Image: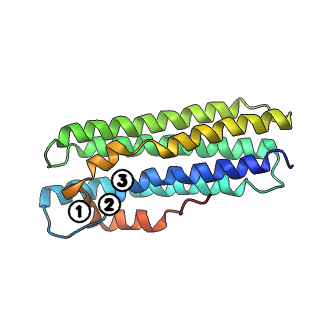
Amino acid sequence: MEGTNPVNKKLAAALSGGAVLVLALTGCGGDDGNEKLDAWAKEVCDAVQPQARKIESANAAIQKETSDNSTPKEVQKADSAAFQDMSEAYKAIGAAVNKAGAPDVENGEQKLTNAVKELNGISASYASLKKQVDGLDTEDQAKFADGLKDIATELDKLSKSGNDALNELEEGEVGEAMARQASCKTATASAPAAKS
């Protein structure tokens, strides 16, 4: 199975970059509290934690199918399921952030709107990657490898873009409030490091 293996490895590396996006949601910082902000951070962190685990599992599934002996069909099935899970997880995080409402900080409303839009955009990107991987020709090794290469490129772009609005949402006091939440700490601790 030589043809797809290097591409699978590239795909796995690009994908683990995607986990970074969730970790943008887990800032770190001081501990002087603001009750309103702490309540907001707790609501968001508690909702993000299961989604972070779902994204981590999707990453692991793709990493697992990058071995030399996986057939194109197995790779396609694993990637498709992983992209579906990631799409759903980012959508759920967007919904959780939206439900929590604007954080009690300057420009909170605008930061919230931008972050939710970004999370929904990431969700849509993964849904689109799922469609792409579902459409690959698993009978033709070379075509399949080429198709995976395109997907890896898209993933790479996705992992490099994407979390500006989230970072902005979590600047300053919001990040500090999130850092005080046990569920955000857990999400950070359990996330895999990006391998390349």
Residue holding disc 3? 47
Q: Quadrant of residue 154?
A: top right
- The amino acid at mark 1 is Glu
Q: Position of residue 167 (x, y in %)?
A: 32, 49
54 vs 32, nearest the viewer = 32
In this rendering, position of residue 107 left or right of residue 77: left
Q: Position of residue 124 (x, y in %)?
A: 49, 33
Q: Position of residue 109 (x, y in %)?
A: 19, 39
Q: CA distance from mark 1 to mark 2?
A: 7 Å
Is the C-beta separation of discs 1 and 2 under 8 Å? Answer: yes
Secondary structure of residue under mark 2? loop
Q: CA distance from mark 2 to mark 3?
A: 15 Å
- The amino acid at mark 2 is Gly
Sequence-first disc among 3 and 1: 3
Secondary structure of residue under mark 3? helix
Residue holding disc 1? 176
Which residue: 61% across, 46% down?
Answer: 82
**Dot 3 alpha-carbon crowd within 10 angstroms: few under 14, some 14 to 19, many 20 or more:** many
- Which is more foreground, mark 2 or mark 3? 2
In this rendering, position of residue 112 left or right of residue 107: right
Residue 27's mark? 2
